[in-house]
Image: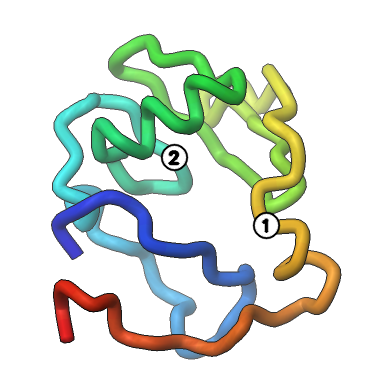
Amino acid sequence: MGGPCLGIIPPHIQEFNYPMPDKCAGGNTRVFVNGRELHEKDLDLLASRGLPAARDRSYIVELSGRVVDKDSGKEIVNLGKLAPTVEKLRCGFGMRAPERAA
Protein backbone atom coordinates (compact mmCIF):
# COMPACT_ATOMS: atom_id res chain seq x y z
CA MET A 1 0.00 0.00 0.00
CA GLY A 2 1.13 3.51 -0.73
CA GLY A 3 3.46 2.75 -3.65
CA PRO A 4 3.61 1.46 -7.21
CA CYS A 5 2.26 -1.92 -8.27
CA LEU A 6 4.29 -4.90 -7.02
CA GLY A 7 2.36 -7.60 -8.87
CA ILE A 8 -0.90 -8.62 -10.48
CA ILE A 9 -3.60 -10.62 -8.72
CA PRO A 10 -6.05 -12.59 -10.87
CA PRO A 11 -9.65 -11.34 -10.73
CA HIS A 12 -12.53 -13.00 -8.89
CA ILE A 13 -10.66 -14.06 -5.75
CA GLN A 14 -13.37 -14.09 -3.10
CA GLU A 15 -11.07 -12.84 -0.31
CA PHE A 16 -10.36 -9.69 -2.34
CA ASN A 17 -13.96 -9.07 -3.40
CA TYR A 18 -14.20 -5.49 -2.18
CA PRO A 19 -13.17 -2.14 -3.65
CA MET A 20 -9.62 -0.91 -3.14
CA PRO A 21 -9.17 2.53 -1.64
CA ASP A 22 -8.63 4.95 -4.53
CA LYS A 23 -5.42 6.22 -2.90
CA CYS A 24 -3.98 2.77 -2.09
CA ALA A 25 -1.08 3.24 -4.54
CA GLY A 26 -0.08 6.66 -3.26
CA GLY A 27 -0.91 7.97 -6.72
CA ASN A 28 -0.99 11.63 -7.66
CA THR A 29 -1.59 11.27 -11.41
CA ARG A 30 -5.37 11.77 -11.53
CA VAL A 31 -5.47 8.71 -13.83
CA PHE A 32 -7.52 5.84 -12.39
CA VAL A 33 -7.31 2.18 -13.40
CA ASN A 34 -9.75 -0.33 -11.96
CA GLY A 35 -10.70 2.13 -9.24
CA ARG A 36 -7.26 3.14 -7.99
CA GLU A 37 -5.30 6.27 -8.78
CA LEU A 38 -2.08 5.26 -10.51
CA HIS A 39 1.33 5.91 -9.02
CA GLU A 40 3.59 7.84 -11.43
CA LYS A 41 5.74 4.72 -12.06
CA ASP A 42 2.66 2.67 -12.96
CA LEU A 43 1.35 5.38 -15.28
CA ASP A 44 4.73 5.65 -17.00
CA LEU A 45 4.83 1.90 -17.60
CA LEU A 46 1.25 1.62 -18.85
CA ALA A 47 1.59 4.77 -20.98
CA SER A 48 4.66 3.22 -22.65
CA ARG A 49 2.35 0.36 -23.70
CA GLY A 50 -0.36 2.70 -25.01
CA LEU A 51 -2.53 3.81 -22.08
CA PRO A 52 -3.53 7.46 -22.55
CA ALA A 53 -1.85 9.55 -19.84
CA ALA A 54 -4.38 12.41 -19.89
CA ARG A 55 -5.34 13.50 -16.38
CA ASP A 56 -8.84 13.12 -14.90
CA ARG A 57 -9.54 9.87 -16.76
CA SER A 58 -10.72 6.50 -15.50
CA TYR A 59 -10.20 3.14 -17.19
CA ILE A 60 -10.93 -0.53 -16.72
CA VAL A 61 -7.92 -2.66 -17.65
CA GLU A 62 -8.28 -6.42 -18.04
CA LEU A 63 -5.49 -9.03 -17.76
CA SER A 64 -5.76 -9.43 -21.53
CA GLY A 65 -4.62 -5.80 -21.85
CA ARG A 66 -7.99 -4.56 -23.09
CA VAL A 67 -8.59 -0.98 -21.90
CA VAL A 68 -12.11 0.40 -21.62
CA ASP A 69 -12.94 4.04 -20.92
CA LYS A 70 -14.99 3.84 -17.72
CA ASP A 71 -17.24 6.77 -18.66
CA SER A 72 -18.11 5.80 -22.25
CA GLY A 73 -17.73 2.01 -21.99
CA LYS A 74 -15.79 2.02 -25.26
CA GLU A 75 -12.62 -0.01 -25.78
CA ILE A 76 -9.86 2.47 -26.51
CA VAL A 77 -6.67 0.42 -26.77
CA ASN A 78 -5.19 -2.99 -26.11
CA LEU A 79 -1.94 -2.94 -24.15
CA GLY A 80 -1.12 -6.59 -24.86
CA LYS A 81 -1.21 -9.32 -22.24
CA LEU A 82 -0.22 -7.89 -18.87
CA ALA A 83 0.19 -11.15 -16.97
CA PRO A 84 0.34 -14.02 -19.47
CA THR A 85 1.44 -16.63 -16.91
CA VAL A 86 -1.34 -15.70 -14.48
CA GLU A 87 -3.86 -15.75 -17.31
CA LYS A 88 -2.64 -19.12 -18.65
CA LEU A 89 -2.35 -20.92 -15.30
CA ARG A 90 -5.30 -19.06 -13.70
CA CYS A 91 -3.12 -18.54 -10.65
CA GLY A 92 0.07 -16.76 -9.71
CA PHE A 93 3.29 -18.06 -8.25
CA GLY A 94 2.14 -17.55 -4.66
CA MET A 95 1.96 -14.51 -2.50
CA ARG A 96 4.86 -13.16 -0.52
CA ALA A 97 5.43 -9.99 1.41
CA PRO A 98 7.46 -7.45 -0.57
CA GLU A 99 10.97 -6.93 0.79
CA ARG A 100 10.34 -3.35 1.84
CA ALA A 101 7.26 -4.33 3.87
CA ALA A 102 8.77 -7.45 5.42
> From the image, which quarter does the C terminus lie in?
bottom left
Q: CA distance from mark 1 to mark 2?
A: 16 Å
Q: Is residue 18 left or right of residue 50?
A: left
Mark identifier at residue 33: 2
Q: Residues within 10 Å of mark 1 (few under 14, many from 20)?
A: some
* Closer to us: 73 or 46: 46
Q: Which of the two discs, 1 and 2, labels the residue nearer the N terminus?
A: 2
Q: Residue at x 21, y 57 (%)?
A: 24
Q: Residues within 10 Å of mark 2 (few under 14, many from 20)?
A: many
Q: Amino acid at mark 1?
A: Ala
Residue at the extreme right of the image, as rendered: 88
In the image, residue 90 sits, relative to residue 29, either above or below, namely below
Q: Which residue is mark 1?
A: 83
Q: Residue at x 52, y 21 (%)?
A: 48
Q: Is residue 28 left or right of residue 90?
A: left
| Circle 1: element type | loop
Q: Residue at x 46, y 87 (%)?
A: 95
Q: Residue at x 54, y 89 (%)?
A: 94
Mark identifier at residue 49: none
Residue at the extreme front of the image, as rendered: 99
Q: Position of residue 21 (x, y in %)?
A: 23, 59
Residue at the extreme top of the image, as rendered: 54
Coloring applied to the structure: rainbow
| Circle 2: element type | strand
> From the image, which quarter does the N terminus lie in?
bottom left
Q: Position of residue 43 (x, y in %)?
A: 37, 30
Q: Is residue 47 left or right of residue 82?
A: left
In the image, residue 4 sits, relative to residue 92, either above or below, namely above
In the image, residue 101 sits, relative to residue 70, either above or below, namely below
* Closer to us: 102 or 13: 102
Q: Amino acid at mark 2?
A: Val
Q: Which image quarter: residue 40?
A: top left
